[in-house]
Image (spheres, helix red, strand yellow):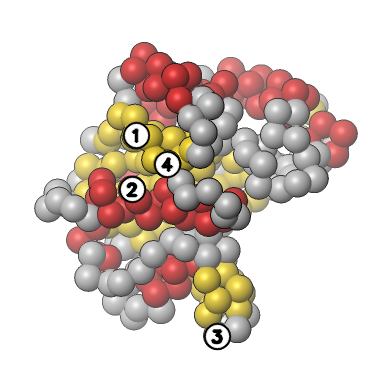
Amino acid sequence: MKTKIFTFVFNRPDILEYQIKSIKKFFIDDYDINVVYDTRDNQYFDQFKEICKTNSVNFYNHISEPGQSPSYYNAQSIQWACENLIFNNDENIIAMFLDHDMFLIDDLNLNVEMSIYDVLGLLQTRGNIRYIWPGLCAFKKSSVKNIKFDFYPQTVDGQILDAGGGTYKLLSNKNIKFLNTGVEYPEEYKGINLKDKSIIGDYGYELHLKQKFLHFRNACNWHNSYLPEDEKKTEILKKILSDFL
């Protein structure tokens, strides 16, 4: 089954090419890459479009409604992709959503990983409500097409759910088989202390799905306690990725 991979970018064109290269090197089976530029001012439009053209990947420009939270912006662009690029045709696919600072660092055959599952992703829980973080999420279109769900933040049974909140409807459906990718927090890489806040800020690296994905956690202004353009952490990221790519 073909996988349509969607990555959602807002800033940081300097790391998009690394993500594309990581997918092309390690993703096994039939796929295509789709970059959705979620923007309010088109500041990085030309840079993102040129990177996509150079790397032969699909590029889409989504203009968000202004004045929203980062969670809402993220959900809005994902929902736009669902409605306009996934559920508006009859193609039987796996749809995969990635934060644009999520990098493959080991071989991934998604058809094998999802052979007995309908949905894959990192589980989030708020009280008794379970939903999926959209920074790493995949689903078989044929399995979920008849379930009314979305990716918007929302409040359910008094619990405030972040981006991806509406996926609680997938996980509450007894017919859906879900694979939780899990998350690990690496402590060091070749002698580099990945817990040193003077290097990584308050949000360290993450490893997902049996250590196949490396999550940078520094590619937007989601958290206000660090600067997305922090050079120290970016230098380490590129050093790590240069070893894998």
- Which residue type carries mark 4? Ile
Q: Gap between marks 2 and 3, in whole Å? A: 28 Å
Horizontal and vertical percent position of residue 33: 33, 33
**Closer to us: 68 or 219:** 68
Q: Which residue is mark 1?
A: 60
In front: label 4 or label 2? 4
Q: Residue at x 46, y 40 (%)?
A: 38
Mark 4 and mark 3 lie on one chain; the one further toward the N terminus is 4
In front: label 1 or label 3? 1
Q: Residue at x 80, y 45 (%)?
A: 225
- Which residue type carries mark 1? Tyr
Mark 2 and mark 3 lie on one chain; the one further toward the N terminus is 2
Outermost residue on the top side: it is 54
Callout 4 crowding tier (Cα within 10 Å): few <14, some 14–19, many ≥20 = some
Q: Determine if residue 115 is in view.
A: no
Q: Which residue is mark 3?
A: 157
Horizontal and vertical percent position of residue 101: 56, 36
Q: Are marks 2 and 1 in contact (CB under 8 Å)?
A: yes
Mark 1 and mark 3 lie on one chain; the one further toward the N terminus is 1
- Residue 81 tag number: 2
Callout 1 crowding tier (Cα within 10 Å): few <14, some 14–19, many ≥20 = some
Q: Residue at x 44, y 35 (%)?
A: 37
Q: Determine if residue 144 is in view.
A: yes
- Which residue type carries mark 3? Asp
Mark 4 and mark 2 lie on one chain; the one further toward the N terminus is 4
Q: Gap between marks 4 and 2, in whole Å? A: 12 Å
Outermost residue on the bottom side: it is 157
Q: Are marks 1 and 4 in contact (CB under 8 Å)?
A: no
207 sits left or right of 228 in the view: left
28 sits left or right of 50 in the view: left
Q: Which residue is mark 4?
A: 63
